[in-house]
Image (tube, rainbow, N blue to C red):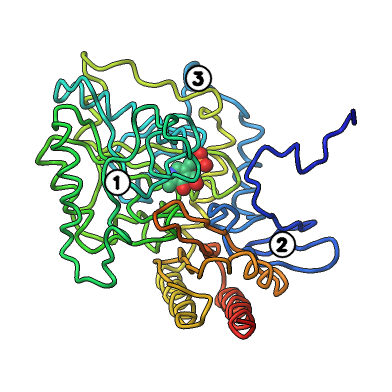
Amino acid sequence: MDRFLPRRERLLASSRPLPDFDVVTARGPWLHCADGRRIFDGSSGLICVNVGQGSPKVFSRIEKQFPRSSFGGAAVVRPHAQLELMDRLCHAVGRPQDSVALVTCGTLGVEVAVRLARNIARVRGGKQHGDILTSSLSYHGMSALTLALAGNHARRPRPEDALGLGPAFPAPYPPVHDHAVRACNASCADEVAKAIDNRGSESVAAVLLEPVNGTIGGAYVPPDGYLRRVSEICRERDVLVIHDEVLTGLWRTGTPLASDHWDGAEPDLCILSKGLGAGYTSVGAVLVSPEVAPLLHHDDADPLPAMGTMAAHPLQAAACLGVLDELETMDPDAFRARGERLGALLRTLTGLSPVQDVRGLGHLYAVELVPGRLWPLMEAAEKRGVFFYPFTGAGHPKSEGLVVAPALNSTDEDISYLTAALCDSVTALDRNG
Ligand SMILES: Cc1ncc(COP(=O)(O)O)c(C=O)c1O
Protein backbone atom coordinates (compact mmCIF):
# COMPACT_ATOMS: atom_id res chain seq x y z
CA MET A 1 0.00 0.00 0.00
CA ASP A 2 1.17 3.55 -0.73
CA ARG A 3 2.70 5.27 2.27
CA PHE A 4 1.08 8.62 1.36
CA LEU A 5 -2.57 9.34 0.78
CA PRO A 6 -3.35 11.56 -2.21
CA ARG A 7 -3.55 15.07 -0.71
CA ARG A 8 -7.24 15.57 -1.59
CA GLU A 9 -8.22 12.46 0.37
CA ARG A 10 -6.31 13.50 3.47
CA LEU A 11 -8.48 16.62 3.70
CA LEU A 12 -11.45 15.74 5.89
CA ALA A 13 -13.61 18.66 4.85
CA SER A 14 -16.29 19.57 2.34
CA SER A 15 -15.86 17.75 -0.97
CA ARG A 16 -17.01 20.70 -3.06
CA PRO A 17 -14.64 21.72 -5.88
CA LEU A 18 -12.16 24.27 -4.50
CA PRO A 19 -10.18 26.76 -6.56
CA ASP A 20 -6.45 26.14 -6.28
CA PHE A 21 -4.59 29.45 -6.06
CA ASP A 22 -0.91 29.49 -5.13
CA VAL A 23 -1.09 32.63 -3.00
CA VAL A 24 2.24 34.29 -2.19
CA THR A 25 1.00 37.60 -0.73
CA ALA A 26 -2.37 38.79 0.52
CA ARG A 27 -3.19 42.46 1.10
CA GLY A 28 -6.65 43.73 1.94
CA PRO A 29 -9.13 41.78 -0.21
CA TRP A 30 -6.52 40.89 -2.88
CA LEU A 31 -4.65 37.61 -3.20
CA HIS A 32 -1.44 37.71 -5.27
CA CYS A 33 -0.50 34.38 -6.86
CA ALA A 34 2.87 32.87 -7.75
CA ASP A 35 1.99 33.05 -11.47
CA GLY A 36 1.51 36.84 -11.25
CA ARG A 37 -2.31 36.81 -11.22
CA ARG A 38 -4.21 38.77 -8.62
CA ILE A 39 -7.56 37.52 -7.38
CA PHE A 40 -10.24 39.45 -5.53
CA ASP A 41 -11.66 37.67 -2.49
CA GLY A 42 -15.36 38.36 -2.94
CA SER A 43 -16.41 36.39 0.14
CA SER A 44 -13.93 37.62 2.77
CA GLY A 45 -12.68 34.06 3.10
CA LEU A 46 -15.44 32.28 4.96
CA ILE A 47 -17.20 35.62 5.45
CA CYS A 48 -14.79 36.50 8.21
CA VAL A 49 -11.83 38.44 6.72
CA ASN A 50 -13.82 41.60 7.35
CA VAL A 51 -10.93 44.09 7.37
CA GLY A 52 -8.85 42.37 4.69
CA GLN A 53 -5.52 40.61 5.10
CA GLY A 54 -2.15 42.03 6.16
CA SER A 55 -3.60 44.79 8.38
CA PRO A 56 -0.82 46.97 9.87
CA LYS A 57 -3.11 47.81 12.81
CA VAL A 58 -3.62 44.15 13.72
CA PHE A 59 0.09 43.48 13.30
CA SER A 60 1.05 46.40 15.53
CA ARG A 61 -1.28 45.25 18.34
CA ILE A 62 0.11 41.69 18.24
CA GLU A 63 3.68 42.98 18.08
CA LYS A 64 3.15 45.15 21.17
CA GLN A 65 1.47 42.37 23.13
CA PHE A 66 3.99 39.68 22.26
CA PRO A 67 6.83 40.78 24.60
CA ARG A 68 4.33 41.65 27.38
CA SER A 69 2.82 38.17 27.61
CA SER A 70 1.90 35.58 25.06
CA PHE A 71 -0.27 33.61 27.47
CA GLY A 72 -2.30 34.36 30.59
CA GLY A 73 -5.03 31.90 31.48
CA ALA A 74 -8.07 33.54 33.09
CA ALA A 75 -8.16 30.89 35.82
CA VAL A 76 -4.71 31.86 37.09
CA VAL A 77 -3.89 35.40 35.96
CA ARG A 78 -6.19 38.42 35.63
CA PRO A 79 -6.78 38.64 31.86
CA HIS A 80 -5.94 42.34 31.24
CA ALA A 81 -5.89 42.26 27.43
CA GLN A 82 -9.16 40.31 27.35
CA LEU A 83 -10.85 42.74 29.75
CA GLU A 84 -9.78 45.65 27.53
CA LEU A 85 -11.20 43.78 24.54
CA MET A 86 -14.52 43.14 26.32
CA ASP A 87 -14.88 46.89 27.06
CA ARG A 88 -14.07 47.92 23.50
CA LEU A 89 -16.33 45.24 22.01
CA CYS A 90 -19.37 46.08 24.16
CA HIS A 91 -19.05 49.77 23.27
CA ALA A 92 -18.51 48.98 19.58
CA VAL A 93 -21.81 47.09 19.37
CA GLY A 94 -23.79 49.53 21.54
CA ARG A 95 -24.22 47.19 24.52
CA PRO A 96 -21.92 48.91 27.04
CA GLN A 97 -23.42 47.27 30.13
CA ASP A 98 -23.22 43.67 28.90
CA SER A 99 -21.20 40.88 30.50
CA VAL A 100 -19.02 38.78 28.20
CA ALA A 101 -17.73 35.21 27.91
CA LEU A 102 -14.86 34.78 25.45
CA VAL A 103 -14.47 31.48 23.60
CA THR A 104 -12.45 30.18 20.67
CA CYS A 105 -14.95 30.05 17.77
CA GLY A 106 -18.53 30.56 16.72
CA THR A 107 -19.64 27.00 17.45
CA LEU A 108 -18.35 27.19 20.98
CA GLY A 109 -19.99 30.61 21.37
CA VAL A 110 -23.36 29.00 20.59
CA GLU A 111 -22.66 26.11 22.96
CA VAL A 112 -21.76 28.51 25.79
CA ALA A 113 -24.77 30.75 25.06
CA VAL A 114 -27.03 27.68 25.28
CA ARG A 115 -25.51 26.76 28.60
CA LEU A 116 -25.76 30.29 30.02
CA ALA A 117 -29.37 30.62 28.84
CA ARG A 118 -30.37 27.33 30.47
CA ASN A 119 -28.68 28.44 33.67
CA ILE A 120 -30.49 31.80 33.65
CA ALA A 121 -33.83 30.10 32.91
CA ARG A 122 -33.36 27.73 35.87
CA VAL A 123 -32.50 30.54 38.28
CA ARG A 124 -35.15 32.97 37.00
CA GLY A 125 -38.06 30.67 36.28
CA GLY A 126 -37.19 27.36 37.90
CA LYS A 127 -37.24 25.83 34.40
CA GLN A 128 -35.79 22.34 34.57
CA HIS A 129 -36.03 21.29 30.89
CA GLY A 130 -34.43 24.34 29.29
CA ASP A 131 -35.28 23.57 25.65
CA ILE A 132 -33.66 25.74 23.00
CA LEU A 133 -35.86 26.41 19.95
CA THR A 134 -34.38 27.11 16.50
CA SER A 135 -35.73 27.75 13.01
CA SER A 136 -36.04 25.39 10.04
CA LEU A 137 -33.43 27.32 8.04
CA SER A 138 -30.49 27.85 10.35
CA TYR A 139 -26.86 26.99 10.98
CA HIS A 140 -25.32 27.37 14.42
CA GLY A 141 -22.03 25.47 14.18
CA MET A 142 -20.43 22.12 13.57
CA SER A 143 -20.46 20.39 16.96
CA ALA A 144 -22.80 17.48 17.64
CA LEU A 145 -25.09 19.70 19.76
CA THR A 146 -25.26 22.71 17.42
CA LEU A 147 -25.84 20.49 14.37
CA ALA A 148 -28.54 18.62 16.27
CA LEU A 149 -30.29 21.85 17.21
CA ALA A 150 -30.22 23.62 13.86
CA GLY A 151 -32.27 23.29 10.69
CA ASN A 152 -29.42 22.54 8.32
CA HIS A 153 -30.45 19.25 6.69
CA ALA A 154 -27.46 19.16 4.38
CA ARG A 155 -24.89 19.00 7.19
CA ARG A 156 -26.96 16.63 9.30
CA PRO A 157 -28.69 14.35 6.80
CA ARG A 158 -29.61 11.61 9.30
CA PRO A 159 -32.68 12.30 11.50
CA GLU A 160 -31.19 10.21 14.34
CA ASP A 161 -28.27 12.67 14.57
CA ALA A 162 -30.72 15.33 15.75
CA LEU A 163 -30.31 13.70 19.20
CA GLY A 164 -34.05 14.18 19.68
CA LEU A 165 -33.68 17.95 19.15
CA GLY A 166 -33.96 19.66 15.75
CA PRO A 167 -35.60 22.88 14.59
CA ALA A 168 -38.89 23.89 16.17
CA PHE A 169 -40.45 26.57 13.96
CA PRO A 170 -40.46 27.52 10.24
CA ALA A 171 -38.11 30.34 9.23
CA PRO A 172 -39.83 33.45 7.86
CA TYR A 173 -38.47 32.76 4.37
CA PRO A 174 -39.63 31.00 1.20
CA PRO A 175 -41.29 28.65 0.59
CA VAL A 176 -42.88 28.75 4.04
CA HIS A 177 -43.19 32.48 3.91
CA ASP A 178 -42.62 34.49 0.73
CA HIS A 179 -42.70 38.08 1.89
CA ALA A 180 -41.55 39.27 -1.53
CA VAL A 181 -44.82 38.01 -2.96
CA ARG A 182 -47.27 38.50 -0.11
CA ALA A 183 -47.49 41.68 1.93
CA CYS A 184 -46.19 40.71 5.34
CA ASN A 185 -47.39 41.92 8.72
CA ALA A 186 -44.77 39.75 10.49
CA SER A 187 -47.48 37.32 11.59
CA CYS A 188 -44.97 34.59 10.66
CA ALA A 189 -43.56 35.31 14.13
CA ASP A 190 -46.69 33.60 15.49
CA GLU A 191 -45.04 30.32 14.46
CA VAL A 192 -42.54 30.96 17.27
CA ALA A 193 -45.40 31.49 19.74
CA LYS A 194 -47.00 28.23 18.57
CA ALA A 195 -43.73 26.32 18.99
CA ILE A 196 -43.26 27.61 22.55
CA ASP A 197 -46.89 27.01 23.52
CA ASN A 198 -46.88 23.48 22.09
CA ARG A 199 -44.06 22.51 24.44
CA GLY A 200 -45.26 24.67 27.30
CA SER A 201 -43.25 27.81 28.04
CA GLU A 202 -42.11 26.26 31.34
CA SER A 203 -40.00 23.85 29.27
CA VAL A 204 -38.37 26.43 27.00
CA ALA A 205 -35.26 28.36 28.02
CA ALA A 206 -34.60 30.30 24.82
CA VAL A 207 -35.24 30.90 21.15
CA LEU A 208 -32.00 30.90 19.17
CA LEU A 209 -31.95 32.53 15.74
CA GLU A 210 -29.81 34.30 13.14
CA PRO A 211 -31.30 37.81 12.83
CA VAL A 212 -30.27 37.82 9.16
CA ASN A 213 -29.67 34.45 7.53
CA GLY A 214 -26.07 33.74 6.56
CA THR A 215 -24.96 30.99 4.22
CA ILE A 216 -27.67 28.37 4.62
CA GLY A 217 -30.51 30.01 2.72
CA GLY A 218 -28.26 32.77 1.42
CA ALA A 219 -28.60 36.21 3.06
CA TYR A 220 -32.35 36.11 3.64
CA VAL A 221 -33.54 39.21 5.49
CA PRO A 222 -36.58 38.77 7.77
CA PRO A 223 -39.68 40.89 7.21
CA ASP A 224 -39.80 44.19 9.11
CA GLY A 225 -41.30 43.66 12.52
CA TYR A 226 -40.42 39.95 12.68
CA LEU A 227 -37.58 40.14 15.20
CA ARG A 228 -39.42 42.65 17.36
CA ARG A 229 -42.50 40.42 17.45
CA VAL A 230 -40.35 37.35 18.28
CA SER A 231 -38.85 39.31 21.19
CA GLU A 232 -42.31 40.31 22.44
CA ILE A 233 -43.59 36.74 22.15
CA CYS A 234 -40.61 35.46 24.13
CA ARG A 235 -40.84 38.16 26.78
CA GLU A 236 -44.56 37.43 27.31
CA ARG A 237 -43.63 33.78 27.93
CA ASP A 238 -40.50 34.30 30.05
CA VAL A 239 -38.31 32.85 27.29
CA LEU A 240 -34.88 34.30 26.46
CA VAL A 241 -33.84 35.43 22.97
CA ILE A 242 -30.37 34.49 21.72
CA HIS A 243 -29.14 36.05 18.48
CA ASP A 244 -26.47 34.14 16.60
CA GLU A 245 -24.52 37.04 15.05
CA VAL A 246 -21.44 34.89 14.45
CA LEU A 247 -21.51 35.87 10.77
CA THR A 248 -23.52 39.11 10.79
CA GLY A 249 -22.00 40.84 13.83
CA LEU A 250 -19.65 43.83 13.65
CA TRP A 251 -20.96 45.71 10.63
CA ARG A 252 -21.30 42.88 8.06
CA THR A 253 -24.90 43.95 7.32
CA GLY A 254 -24.12 47.67 7.58
CA THR A 255 -24.82 48.16 11.31
CA PRO A 256 -22.82 47.00 14.36
CA LEU A 257 -25.35 44.19 14.90
CA ALA A 258 -27.81 42.96 12.28
CA SER A 259 -30.62 43.37 14.82
CA ASP A 260 -29.90 47.14 14.85
CA HIS A 261 -31.81 47.39 11.57
CA TRP A 262 -35.06 47.08 13.53
CA ASP A 263 -36.37 48.74 16.69
CA GLY A 264 -37.17 46.57 19.68
CA ALA A 265 -35.14 43.60 18.41
CA GLU A 266 -32.32 43.55 20.99
CA PRO A 267 -31.68 40.02 22.27
CA ASP A 268 -30.87 38.89 25.82
CA LEU A 269 -27.76 37.08 24.60
CA CYS A 270 -25.76 37.69 21.46
CA ILE A 271 -22.96 35.61 19.93
CA LEU A 272 -20.18 37.18 17.84
CA SER A 273 -17.21 35.56 16.18
CA LYS A 274 -16.19 35.90 12.54
CA GLY A 275 -16.00 39.69 12.31
CA LEU A 276 -14.27 39.97 15.68
CA GLY A 277 -11.24 37.85 14.82
CA ALA A 278 -11.59 38.87 11.14
CA GLY A 279 -9.66 35.76 10.13
CA TYR A 280 -6.57 36.78 12.17
CA THR A 281 -7.52 34.71 15.16
CA SER A 282 -10.05 32.13 16.20
CA VAL A 283 -12.39 33.76 18.70
CA GLY A 284 -15.98 33.99 19.82
CA ALA A 285 -17.80 36.18 22.33
CA VAL A 286 -21.11 35.72 24.11
CA LEU A 287 -22.65 38.99 25.27
CA VAL A 288 -25.25 38.84 28.03
CA SER A 289 -27.55 41.78 28.78
CA PRO A 290 -27.43 43.53 32.18
CA GLU A 291 -31.06 42.50 32.83
CA VAL A 292 -30.17 38.81 33.05
CA ALA A 293 -26.38 38.58 33.56
CA PRO A 294 -26.61 39.11 37.38
CA LEU A 295 -28.60 35.86 37.60
CA LEU A 296 -25.45 34.00 36.55
CA HIS A 297 -23.87 35.09 39.85
CA HIS A 298 -26.91 34.08 41.93
CA ASP A 299 -26.41 31.56 44.77
CA ASP A 300 -28.64 29.07 42.91
CA ALA A 301 -26.75 29.40 39.61
CA ASP A 302 -24.52 26.64 38.29
CA PRO A 303 -20.80 27.35 38.10
CA LEU A 304 -19.91 29.64 35.20
CA PRO A 305 -18.35 27.88 32.21
CA ALA A 306 -14.56 28.00 32.12
CA MET A 307 -13.31 30.22 29.30
CA GLY A 308 -11.32 27.34 27.83
CA THR A 309 -7.55 27.11 27.63
CA MET A 310 -7.03 29.15 24.49
CA ALA A 311 -9.86 31.66 24.97
CA ALA A 312 -7.83 33.28 27.70
CA HIS A 313 -5.20 34.30 25.19
CA PRO A 314 -3.68 37.79 25.17
CA LEU A 315 -2.39 37.54 21.59
CA GLN A 316 -5.88 36.67 20.43
CA ALA A 317 -7.27 39.67 22.32
CA ALA A 318 -4.56 41.89 20.79
CA ALA A 319 -5.52 40.77 17.27
CA CYS A 320 -9.20 41.54 17.99
CA LEU A 321 -8.30 44.98 19.35
CA GLY A 322 -6.45 45.61 16.07
CA VAL A 323 -9.57 44.58 14.15
CA LEU A 324 -11.68 47.00 16.21
CA ASP A 325 -9.06 49.72 15.50
CA GLU A 326 -9.51 49.06 11.77
CA LEU A 327 -13.31 49.14 12.00
CA GLU A 328 -13.19 52.39 13.98
CA THR A 329 -11.24 54.20 11.26
CA MET A 330 -13.87 53.46 8.60
CA ASP A 331 -15.90 56.49 7.53
CA PRO A 332 -19.49 55.40 8.38
CA ASP A 333 -21.15 57.39 5.57
CA ALA A 334 -18.76 56.19 2.88
CA PHE A 335 -19.07 52.63 4.21
CA ARG A 336 -22.87 52.75 4.12
CA ALA A 337 -22.83 54.24 0.61
CA ARG A 338 -20.48 51.48 -0.63
CA GLY A 339 -22.82 48.80 0.73
CA GLU A 340 -25.81 50.44 -0.98
CA ARG A 341 -23.88 50.67 -4.26
CA LEU A 342 -22.88 47.00 -3.97
CA GLY A 343 -26.56 46.05 -3.56
CA ALA A 344 -27.70 48.27 -6.43
CA LEU A 345 -25.06 46.86 -8.82
CA LEU A 346 -25.87 43.27 -7.85
CA ARG A 347 -29.60 43.86 -8.33
CA THR A 348 -28.94 44.69 -11.99
CA LEU A 349 -28.35 40.94 -12.40
CA THR A 350 -32.02 40.24 -11.71
CA GLY A 351 -33.70 39.18 -14.93
CA LEU A 352 -30.66 37.46 -16.47
CA SER A 353 -31.47 33.81 -17.08
CA PRO A 354 -29.06 32.18 -14.56
CA VAL A 355 -30.26 34.43 -11.71
CA GLN A 356 -33.28 33.61 -9.58
CA ASP A 357 -33.02 36.29 -6.89
CA VAL A 358 -30.68 38.91 -5.40
CA ARG A 359 -31.09 39.77 -1.71
CA GLY A 360 -29.15 41.01 1.28
CA LEU A 361 -28.03 44.02 3.28
CA GLY A 362 -24.86 46.05 3.81
CA HIS A 363 -21.88 44.00 2.64
CA LEU A 364 -23.77 40.67 2.72
CA TYR A 365 -25.62 39.63 -0.43
CA ALA A 366 -26.74 36.40 -2.05
CA VAL A 367 -27.20 35.84 -5.77
CA GLU A 368 -29.49 32.84 -5.96
CA LEU A 369 -29.09 30.87 -9.18
CA VAL A 370 -31.14 28.53 -11.31
CA PRO A 371 -30.19 24.93 -10.38
CA GLY A 372 -27.10 23.69 -12.23
CA ARG A 373 -25.54 27.13 -12.84
CA LEU A 374 -23.49 27.52 -9.64
CA TRP A 375 -20.24 25.75 -10.57
CA PRO A 376 -20.09 27.08 -14.16
CA LEU A 377 -20.55 30.58 -12.73
CA MET A 378 -17.87 30.08 -10.05
CA GLU A 379 -15.50 28.96 -12.82
CA ALA A 380 -16.38 31.90 -15.06
CA ALA A 381 -15.84 34.33 -12.15
CA GLU A 382 -12.49 32.79 -11.22
CA LYS A 383 -11.32 33.27 -14.82
CA ARG A 384 -12.21 36.95 -14.39
CA GLY A 385 -10.18 37.18 -11.17
CA VAL A 386 -12.77 36.95 -8.39
CA PHE A 387 -14.22 34.22 -6.20
CA PHE A 388 -17.24 33.95 -3.91
CA TYR A 389 -18.70 31.66 -1.26
CA PRO A 390 -20.94 29.04 -2.88
CA PHE A 391 -24.08 28.16 -0.93
CA THR A 392 -25.63 24.88 -1.87
CA GLY A 393 -28.84 25.09 0.06
CA ALA A 394 -30.23 23.39 3.10
CA GLY A 395 -33.82 24.53 2.80
CA HIS A 396 -36.82 23.03 1.04
CA PRO A 397 -36.84 23.53 -1.87
CA LYS A 398 -33.07 23.60 -2.02
CA SER A 399 -31.67 26.94 -3.16
CA GLU A 400 -28.14 27.55 -4.41
CA GLY A 401 -26.00 30.47 -5.39
CA LEU A 402 -23.19 32.80 -4.39
CA VAL A 403 -22.74 34.72 -1.19
CA VAL A 404 -21.15 38.05 -2.10
CA ALA A 405 -19.44 39.48 0.98
CA PRO A 406 -16.36 41.60 0.28
CA ALA A 407 -14.19 43.02 3.07
CA LEU A 408 -15.90 45.91 4.84
CA ASN A 409 -12.98 48.23 4.06
CA SER A 410 -12.97 47.44 0.33
CA THR A 411 -12.60 50.58 -1.78
CA ASP A 412 -15.07 51.93 -4.36
CA GLU A 413 -12.72 50.61 -7.07
CA ASP A 414 -12.74 47.16 -5.42
CA ILE A 415 -16.56 47.09 -5.47
CA SER A 416 -16.54 48.16 -9.12
CA TYR A 417 -14.06 45.40 -9.99
CA LEU A 418 -15.99 42.71 -8.13
CA THR A 419 -19.40 43.62 -9.55
CA ALA A 420 -18.09 44.09 -13.10
CA ALA A 421 -16.39 40.66 -13.01
CA LEU A 422 -19.55 39.03 -11.66
CA CYS A 423 -21.89 40.79 -14.13
CA ASP A 424 -19.57 39.78 -16.97
CA SER A 425 -19.57 36.16 -15.81
CA VAL A 426 -23.37 36.00 -15.44
CA THR A 427 -23.87 37.68 -18.83
CA ALA A 428 -21.52 35.16 -20.48
CA LEU A 429 -23.51 32.30 -18.96
CA ASP A 430 -26.79 33.98 -19.96
CA ARG A 431 -25.58 34.21 -23.59
CA ASN A 432 -24.52 30.57 -23.62
CA GLY A 433 -27.94 29.50 -22.32
C1 LIG B 1 -24.53 31.72 11.89
C2 LIG B 1 -23.35 30.87 12.29
N1 LIG B 1 -23.29 30.36 13.52
C3 LIG B 1 -22.27 29.59 13.93
C4 LIG B 1 -21.22 29.30 13.08
C5 LIG B 1 -20.08 28.45 13.55
O1 LIG B 1 -18.91 29.23 13.68
P1 LIG B 1 -17.47 28.53 13.60
O2 LIG B 1 -17.29 28.03 12.21
O3 LIG B 1 -16.51 29.63 13.96
O4 LIG B 1 -17.43 27.46 14.62
C6 LIG B 1 -21.24 29.81 11.77
C7 LIG B 1 -20.15 29.50 10.83
O5 LIG B 1 -20.24 29.66 9.64
C8 LIG B 1 -22.34 30.62 11.36
O6 LIG B 1 -22.42 31.13 10.11
Q: Is residue 208 above or below residue 406?
A: above
* Gap between marks 3 and 2 measured at Cα: 39 Å
Viewer can see residue 273: no
* Gap between marks 1 and 3 measured at Cα: 26 Å
The amino acid type found where label 2 is placed reads Leu
The amino acid type found where label 3 is placed reads Val
Q: Nearer the viewer, mark 3 or mark 2?
A: 2
- Residue that protrudes farthest toward the top in the picture: 299
Q: Position of residue 368 (x, y in %)?
A: 47, 67
Residue 31 numbered tag: 2
- Residue that protrudes farthest toward the bottom in the picture: 431
Q: Position of residue 420 (x, y in %)?
A: 60, 80
Sequence-wise first label, 3 or 2: 2
Residue placed at 72% from the left, 58% from the top? 19
Give the position of the C terminus as an image quadrant. Answer: bottom right
| Foreground of the two, 115 or 173 | 173
- Residue that protrudes farthest toward the left in the picture: 236
Q: Which residue is tagged 3?
A: 77
The amino acid type found where label 1 is placed reads Arg
